[in-house]
Amino acid sequence: MSKSLGNCIYLKDSEEEIKNKVFKMYTDPDHIRVEDPGKIEGNVVFTYLDVFCKDDSFEKYLPEYKSLDELKDHYRKGGLGDMKIKKFLNDILQEELRPIRQRREKLAENPEYIYEILKKGTLKARKKASETLKEVKKAMGINYFE
């Protein structure tokens, strides 16, 4: 997935935007019919599943499978359609991103608060950077003005 292609999944994306992007994801070009065997390698949907799939994901969204390995084996053998795994991935991503999206929306209601956090963080970072720079100059013997 690529930002330049317009298919990057952002934390601020709505549920509908995420669903559309997941359903358009590249899978296996040789997996034309459900009964065709599929390749996992290079399949973006399985790449995302490797990252986001949790132990309880199957129990919640795809109870006919026990694990990601079992799902992958079925896909490799054939008999498993791309839309089924895309729907599964969409459910997982929605669950993962929903609290992030809600927190972001709540924070966006108060931009002054965000500005204050950034201001405090900047001051803290400047102080730490100044201390580190002093240490570096001392270690290198170039603290000429002290």
Image (cartoon, rainbow, N blue to C red):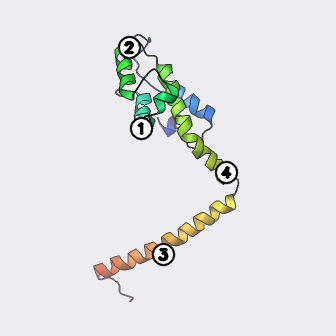
Quarter of the figure that contains the C terminus:
bottom left
Pointer 1 or 3: first along the chain: 1
For residue 106, the mark is 4
Q: Is residue 57 above or below residue 71?
A: below
For residue 127, the mark is 3
Q: Position of residue 65 (x, y in %)?
A: 43, 22
CA–CA distance between discs 2 and 1? 23 Å
Q: Nearer the viewer, residue 116 or 68?
A: 68
Marks 2 and 1 close (CB-CB < 8 Å) = no
For residue 78, the mark is 2
Q: Is residue 89 above or below residue 126?
A: above
Q: Amino acid at mark 4?
A: Lys
Mark 1 lies on residue? 51
Q: Nearer the viewer, mark 2 or mark 3?
A: 2
CA–CA distance between discs 4 and 2? 44 Å
Q: Nearer the viewer, mark 1 or mark 3?
A: 1
Q: Nearer the viewer, residue 66 or 17?
A: 66
20 sits to left or right of 133: right
Marks 4 and 3 close (CB-CB < 8 Å) = no
Pointer 4 or 3: first along the chain: 4
> Residue at the spot x=37%, y=23% of the render?
70
Q: Position of residue 117 (x, y in %)?
A: 60, 64
Q: Position of residue 130 (x, y in %)?
A: 44, 76
Pointer 4 or 2: first along the chain: 2
CA–CA distance between discs 1 and 4? 27 Å
CA–CA distance between discs 4 and 3? 30 Å
10 sits to left or right of 67: right
Q: Amino acid at mark 2?
A: Gly
Pointer 2 or 3: first along the chain: 2
CA–CA distance between discs 1 and 3? 37 Å
**Regarding mark 4 in the picture, which secondary structure is present there?**
helix
**Regarding mark 3 in the picture, which secondary structure is present there?**
helix
